[in-house]
Image (cartoon, rainbow, N blue to C red):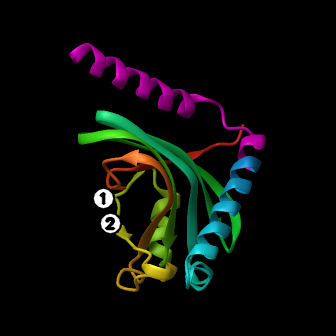
Amino acid sequence: MKRTIKGTILAVTMLFTGQALAAFTAADATKLETDASAAVTRFKSQTSGAEDLLNHAKGVLVCPEITKGGFIIGVESGKCVMQVGGKPVEYYTNRAGKFGLLAGIQQYSLILVFNDQASLDLFRTGKREFEIGVDASVAVAKVGAGGSLDTTNLKGPIVAFTFGDKGLMGDLSIEGATFKKLQVE
C-alpha cells in the first residue's frame, strides 16, 4: 500500500513539474491569451454582474485551466495571464502543494480580481513568488442561484472566483497557491 501511495505521488508530481519546467514561448502566450479570453467570456455569460465587476477592476488574473490532483499529498499547476484594462500584460505560472485528506483529480478556471492598485502592484512587482495567504488574503466569492454574485466579499482588495469544475477532488481551497512571473522566450 505504501508503495502505491509513493508511486502515485511521484507520478503526479512529475506530471505537474514537467509542465512548469518547459520553456514559455510566444506561441504559448498567444494560446494562453485565447484560452483566458474564452474563460472570461464563459464567466461573464454564467454570472450576472461579472462584466461590471471586471470593468471596475484594477487588474484581473485569469487562469483558464488549473489542474489539481493527488492522494493524501496533492499538487496543482496552471498558467495565467494578467489583464490590465482588458489587455494582457504579463504571464504567470500557478502551483501549490497540499497535504491532508485529498483524493482525486480536478480541473477548474480561476479569476483573481484586484480591486485596489496597492494589491495589484504588490502582486506584479514582488521580488519573489506571490503566495496567497502570506502576501495577501483573498476573499473567495460565491456565485449564487441563477448565476448572481454574492456581494458580501466583492469589495475586498483581491477576490477569487473558481468555476468550470471538471473531475472530483476533495479539496477546493486556493490558500497556499503561489504565482511566479513567466518570461516569454
Q: Which mark is residue 12?
A: none
What residue sits right under mark 2 in the picture? 137
Q: Is residue 45 above or below residue 28?
A: below
Residue at image position (69%, 54%) is 35
Quarter occupied by residue 69: top left
Given residues 30 and 163, the one toward you in this image is 163
Estimate the spatial distance between the alpha carbons at disc 1 and disc 2, rounded to whole Å: 5 Å
**Residue 52: image location, x then y, percent:** 59, 86
What residue sits right under mark 1 in the picture? 133
**Residue 63: image location, x then y, percent:** 56, 55
Q: For residue 128, say whether it is visible.
A: no
Quarter occupied by residue 53: bottom right
Q: Quadrant of the N terminus?
A: top left
Q: Does the magenta stretch mainly form a helix, a strand or a loop?
A: helix
Which contiguous range is marked in magenta?
Answer: 1-29
Please tell me whether mark 2 sits on a helix, a strand or a loop.
loop
Q: Quadrant of the C terminus?
A: top right
Residue at image position (34%, 37%) is 74
Given residues 24 and 139, the one toward you in this image is 139
**Residue 123: image location, x then y, percent:** 47, 61
**Residue 70: image location, x then y, percent:** 35, 34
Residues at marks 1 and 2 touching, judged by CB atoms closer than 8 Å = yes
